[in-house]
Image (cartoon, rainbow, N blue to C red):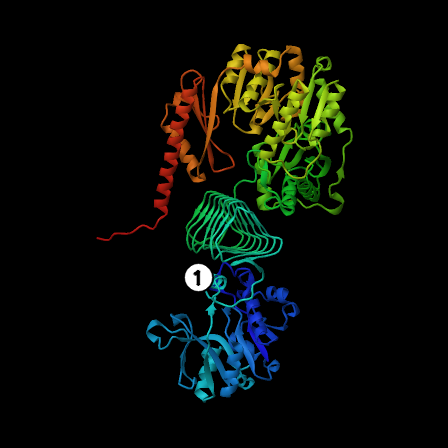
C-alpha cells in the first residue's frame, strides 16, 4: 500500500518558524513532523511514500533523500508553478496510485492506529474513508456527522460558532480508492473537503468516517506547536524519540555534557553535542536541540530550543521557542509564548515580552525591551568597536566569515597596495581569525607583514619601523577568556582613532568593499630580525650598566603566554638571574582562579629563593603583578602608586598619565616630586594618546595597575616586559626594595569600588540625574561623573563602556568616609535605576482609555 504525504504547506500561522522552513520540517522533539509521520507509516507496514511538495521543496528533499535512511521508499511530486490544492496535487500523481492508498498530512502529530482504519475501509467497501477524531473546540476543523453505520451524512469545513453541529472532526487522513480521483479535473486547483467529498456525498458514493482513538494535533499555530512538544514529552502521544532515555524522563543525545550541578526536573529532552553549564535549572517540558550551549545559571522553564542555539549565563527562557542558531545573551529574558526566529541575537539583558514574534536574522540590542513583533528591517546593531577594539565570543561572534569581512572593511579604508602588520597570540583560535583577516585584506589589494605569534609590546614597537599603514593584533581577551580581542593600531603603534573606527564600521555595514583584479591581490611576507628591533629599542631606553651590576634575582611567571619567548633572552644578556615559571605555550586561556593559584605559587618560589622580587605577566605581555621578597603581591592601586613613586623619584618634575578612577595617592606622590598628573578617560586608547610626545612631551609614565604601564620613550603601548627591566633598574639605582617603598613611601589612601547592574536604557538618565543634583563647581566630567568634596575626597560614577554596568569609586584619606559615601551613592544609584525601570514598565504596559 502506498501513502501520499501532503508536505507542501508553507505554515503561515507558524511564522517566524516557517520563514525558511516548510511546515512539515518544523521539529517536534528534535525531529521534523514529517519524520514522525513516516515513522507512523512504517509502524503500520506502509513503506512506499509519495511526498507532494510546493513550499521550499529542496529542504525536504535534502533531508529525506530517497528515504532509504528512514526505512521507506520515497519519491517526490513537486507543484512547480502554483499550488493545486489538497486534492489537485493527488490528482496530479494519479498514474502512481493504482490501488487503495492513504493520504496523510505532513503537518500534524498523531499516533492513530492506521492499520485499524485501513481494515475498517476494506470492511465497509468504502470508496473513501475519512479518519475522524473528537475535539473540544471544532471551530478550526472540518466537522463531520455520520450515521449509526459510520457512513458520512454531512460535513462542513471550518464552521462558525453558530454552525457547529458536532465535535467529530476531519483529521486530514484519508483512505481512498483510485476511482474517486476520476471526479477531479486535471491540472486544476481542488480541495478534498470543499470539492471532492461534497461531490462524493452528492453522487451517493460509499464514504465512511472512522473515529480513531489516540492522539492527534493539527500543528496549525504556535500554541499548538508548543503543546504538541509537551504532549510528546509527557507521553500523551506515542512518538519515536531520537535519543536514549538515560534516566527516567531524561532523553539525552550522544557527546552531551551536563554539569553535575545542573537541576533537571523531568521530563526533559537534550540533543547531541550539547553543553549545559554549572547551576542551570531545567524545568519539565524543556526541549533542547542538537549542538546547543547553555551558560551557567541559566533558568529554563519549558522552552523549545532548536539546533545550534546558544543561551548565555543567567538567561531566562519561559515557554518560548528559540530558532535554529539563535543566540540569547547573558541575563536576557524571553518570556511566555515568544518566538525568536533562526539566526537572531538577543542582546545582554534584553527582554522579549510575552507572545512577541521575532523574524529570522534579527538583532535585539543589549538592554532593549521588545513589546511588538519584529518583522521588517533589523534593529540597529551596536558599534563594531568597543573600548579596546573589536571583541566577541570566539568562533561565535568572531567567526572566520566575520573576520574576512572585517579585514576587507579595514583594507578598503586604505590605499591599494598599502602594507599592514598583523600579529597574534599563540592560540589556534587567534591563528584562525588572523588568517581570515589576512584573506579579507588581500582581497582588497593590501599587502601583509605577518609577525605570527608575538607579544603585543613587540608588535607596537616594530610597527613604526616597517613602513606600514597600520596593524592588527589578535588575542584572547585579557578579562574574558571565551572572547577574542582584535586591536587595530596606527603607524605609530597607538590604537586607531575613533574617526578611522567609524570608517571601518561604515565599510563593514554597507559592505562597501573594494574588489581588485587578480594581479592586484595582496601578498604576505614574514619580517625578519623583529626581535632584534625590539631588543635594540629596549636597551636604548634602559640604564643597562645599573642592571648588570644589580645582582638581581627575579622570578617571572609567564602564565603560559607568548611573552615568555623574549624576556629571558634580554635579562640574560643584561646579566640578570631570571628564574622562569610557566613559560610553555598553552592553547586555552588561564582562568582567574588558575592565575591566583599561580600567583600564590610564585610567592612561595620568591620567598624560597630569596629573590629580589617576582612578577606575573599576563595579557600577552601587557599587564603584570609584582611580588615582594616576602611573597606578598603588589597590584591594582598599590602597584600604580609604587610605579609612580619610583618613576618620579628618577624623573622629578615629570608628568604621569593615569585613568580618571585612579587613587589620589598619585597626586600626593606627584606633589612631593613637583610632578604633574594628567587624568584621562578610563580607556587604553585615551591613555596611549595622552602619553604621546606630540600631545604631552614630559610624560614619563602612563597607565595603571589594572591596565598596565606605558613608557612613551619606548613605544606608546603597555609593556610588562620593559616594566620588569625598569623596576630592576630603579630598585638598583635608588637602593630600595619593593617592600620598603610600599611600607615607607606610599600615601595611606583608602580607595574602594562597587559595581551596580544598570540597563543600557537607564545609563544616560542616571548621568543626567547626577549632574543635575550636584553643584557644577564640584563636578569633573572627564569620564562619567566625578563629584569632588574637601581635600582629596571624591566619588566617581562611571558607566561601563561594554556592559550594562555602572562602577562606583570612592576615594579619601579617611576610610570611614569612603565606606559611608560608597554606601550612600550605591543606594542613590540603585534607587534611581529601580525608579526608572518602574517608569519604563508603566510606559510599556497597555493603557486604558476612559470615555466620559
**Quick one: SS at disc 1?**
helix
Q: Viewer-proximal residue, 412 or 270?
A: 270
- Whether 331 is drawn above or below 695: the answer is below
Identify which residue is drawn at 43% across, 18% down.
Answer: 814
Can residue 723 be seen here? The reply is: no
Q: Viewer-proximal residue, 697 or 301?
A: 301
Q: Position of residue 696 (x, y in %)?
A: 58, 19
Q: Position of residue 667 (x, y in %)?
A: 51, 16
Q: Position of residue 483 (x, y in %)?
A: 59, 40
With 246 as the anchor, is 334 left or right in this view? left
Q: Quadrant of residue 841?
A: top left
Q: Viewer-proximal residue, 230 or 683?
A: 230
Q: Quadrant of residue 604?
A: top right
Viewport quadrant of the N terminus: bottom right
Which residue in the structure is indicated by mark 1?
Answer: 223
Can residue 202 be seen here? The reply is: yes
Q: Viewer-proximal residue, 267 or 222?
A: 267
- Whether 18 is drawn above or below 635: the answer is below
Q: Position of residue 800 (x, y in %)?
A: 49, 33
Amino acid at each position: 500500500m502506498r501513502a501520499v504525504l501532503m508536505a507542501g504547506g508553507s505554515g503561515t500561522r507558524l511564522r517566524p518558524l516557517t520563514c525558511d522552513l516548510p511546515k512539515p520540517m518544523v521539529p517536534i522533539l528534535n525531529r521534523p513532523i514529517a519524520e514522525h509521520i513516516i515513522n507512523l507509516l512504517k509502524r503500520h507496514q506502509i513503506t512506499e511514500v509519495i511526498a507532494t511538495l510546493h513550499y521550499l521543496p529542496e529542504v525536504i528533499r535534502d533531508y529525506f533523500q530517497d528515504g532509504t535512511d528512514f526505512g521507506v521508499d520515497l519519491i517526490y511530486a513537486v507543484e512547480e508553478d502554483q499550488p493545486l490544492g489538497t486534492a489537485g496535487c493527488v490528482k496530479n500523481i494519479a498514474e502512481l496510485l493504482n490501488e487503495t492508498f492513504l493520504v496523510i498530512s505532513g503537518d500534524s502529530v498523531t499516533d492513530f492506529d492506521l492499520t485499524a482504519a485501513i481494515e475498517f475501509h476494506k470492511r465497509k467497501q468504502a470508496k473513501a474513508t475519512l479518519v475522524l477524531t473528537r475535539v473540544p473546540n471544532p471551530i478550526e476543523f472540518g466537522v463531520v456527522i455520520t450515521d449509526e453505520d459510520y457512513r458520512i451524512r454531512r460535513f462542513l469545513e471550518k464552521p462558525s460558532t453558530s454552525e457547529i453541529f458536532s465535535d467529530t472532526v476531519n483529521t486530514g487522513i484519508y483512505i481512498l480508492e483510485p476511482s474517486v480521483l476520476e471526479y477531479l479535473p486535471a491540472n486544476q486547483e481542488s480541495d478534498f473537503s470543499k470539492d471532492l467529498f461534497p461531490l462524493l456525498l452528492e453522487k451517493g458514493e460509499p464514504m465512511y468516517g472512522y473515529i480513531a482513538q489516540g492522539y492527534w494535533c493539527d500543528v496549525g499555530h504556535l500554541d499548538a506547536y508548543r503543546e504538541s512538544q509537551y504532549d510528546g514529552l509527557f507521553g500523551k502521544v506515542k512518538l519515536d524519540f531520537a535519543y536514549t532515555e538515560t534516566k527516567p524522563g531524561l532523553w539525552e543525545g550522544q557527546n552531551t555534557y551536563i554539569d553535575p550541578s545542573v537541576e533537571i526536573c523531568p521530563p526533559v529532552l537534550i540533543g547531541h553535542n550539547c553543553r549545559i553549564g554549572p547551576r542551570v535549572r531545567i524545568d519539565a517540558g524543556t526541549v533542547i536541540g542538537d549542538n546547543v550551549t547553555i551558560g551557567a545559571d541559566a533558568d529554563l522553564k519549558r522552552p523549545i530550543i532548536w539546533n545550534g542555539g546558544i543561551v548565555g549565563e543567567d538567561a531566562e527562557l519561559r515557554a518560548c521557542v528559540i530558532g535554529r542558531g539563535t543566540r540569547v545573551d547573558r541575563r536576557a529574558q524571553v518570556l511566555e509564548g515568544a518566538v525568536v526566529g533562526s539566526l537572531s541575537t538577543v542582546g545582554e539583558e534584553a527582554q522579549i515580552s510575552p507572545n512577541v514574534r521575532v523574524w529570522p536574522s534579527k538583532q535585539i540590542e543589549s538592554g532593549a525591551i521588545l513589546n511588538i513583533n519584529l518583522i521588517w528591517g533589523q534593529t540597529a546593531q551596536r558599534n563594531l568597536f568597543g573600548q579596546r577594539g573589536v571583541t566577541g565570543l570566539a568562533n561565535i561572534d568572531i567567526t572566520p566569515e566575520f573576520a574576512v569581512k572585517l579585514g576587507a572593511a579595514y583594507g578598503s579604508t586604505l590605499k591599494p597596495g598599502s602594507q599592514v602588520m598583523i600579529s597574534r597570540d599563540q592560540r589556534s583560535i587567534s591563528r584562525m581569525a588572523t588568517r581570515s583577516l589576512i584573506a579579507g585584506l588581500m582581497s582588497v589589494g593590501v599587502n601583509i607583514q605577518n609577525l605570527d605569534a608575538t607579544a603585543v609590546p613587540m608588535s607596537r614597537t616594530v610597527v613604526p619601523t616597517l613602513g606600514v599603514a597600520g596593524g592588527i593584533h589578535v588575542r584572547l581577551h585579557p578579562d574574558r577568556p571565551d572572547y577574542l580581542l582584535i586591536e587595530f593600531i596606527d603607524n605609530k603603534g597607538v590604537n586607531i582613532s575613533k574617526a578611522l573606527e567609524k570608517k571601518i564600521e561604515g565599510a563593514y555595514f554597507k559592505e562597501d568593499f573594494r574588489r581588485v583584479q587578480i594581479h592586484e591581490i595582496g601578498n604576505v611576507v614574514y619580517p625578519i630580525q623583529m626581535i632584534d628591533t625590539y631588543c635594540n629599542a629596549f636597551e636604548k631606553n634602559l640604564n643597562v650598566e645599573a642592571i648588570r651590576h644589580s645582582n638581581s634575582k627575579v622570578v617571572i611567571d609567564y602564565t603560559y603566554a607568548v611573552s615568555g619567548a623574549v624576556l629571558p633572552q634580554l635579562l640574560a644578556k643584561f646579566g640578570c638571574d631570571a628564574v622562569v615559571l610557566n613559560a610553555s605555550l598553552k592553547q586555552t586561556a588561564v582562568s582567574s582562579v588558575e592565575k591566583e593559584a599561580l600567583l600564590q605559587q610564585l610567592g612561595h618560589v620568591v620567598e624560597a629563593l630569596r629573590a629580589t622580587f617576582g612578577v606575573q605577566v599576563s595579557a600577552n605581555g601587557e599587564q603584570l603583578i609584582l611580588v615582594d621578597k616576602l611573597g606578598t603581591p603588589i597590584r591594582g592601586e598599590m602597584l600604580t602608586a609604587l610605579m609612580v613613586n619610583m618613576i618620579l623619584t628618577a624623573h622629578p618634575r615629570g608628568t604621569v598619565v593615569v585613568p580618571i578612577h585612579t587613587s589620589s595617592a598619585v597626586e600626593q606622590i606627584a606633589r612631593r616630586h613637583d610632578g604633574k598628573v594628567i587624568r584621562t578617560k578610563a580607556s587604553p586608547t585615551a591613555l596611549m594618546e595622552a602619553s604621546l610626545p606630540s600631545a604631552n612631551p614630559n610624560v614619563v609614565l602612563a597607565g595603571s595597575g589594572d591596565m598596565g604601564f606605558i613608557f612613551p620613550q619606548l613605544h606608546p603601548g603597555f609593556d610588562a616586559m620593559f616594566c620588569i627591566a625598569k623596576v630592576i633598574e630603579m630598585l638598583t639605582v635608588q637602593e630600595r626594595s619593593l617592600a620598603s617603598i610600599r611600607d615607607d613611601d606610599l600615601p595611606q589612601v583608602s580607595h574602594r569600588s562597587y559595581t551596580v547592574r544598570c540597563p543600557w536604557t537607564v545609563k544616560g538618565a542616571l548621568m543626567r540625574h547626577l549632574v543635575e543634583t550636584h553643584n557644577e563647581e564640584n563636578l569633573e566630567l572627564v569620564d562619567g561623573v566625578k563629584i569632588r568634596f574637601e581635600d582629596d575626597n571624591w566619588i566617581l560614577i562611571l558607566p561601563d563602556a561594554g556592559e550594562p554596568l555602572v562602577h562606583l569609586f570612592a576615594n579619601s584619606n579617611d576610610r570611614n568616609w569612603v565606606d559611608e559615601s560608597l554606601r550612600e551613592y550605591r543606594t542613590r544609584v540603585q534607587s534611581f535605576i529601580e525608579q526608572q525601570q518602574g517608569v519604563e514598565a508603566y510606559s510599556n504596559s497597555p493603557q486604558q482609555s476612559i470615555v466620559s
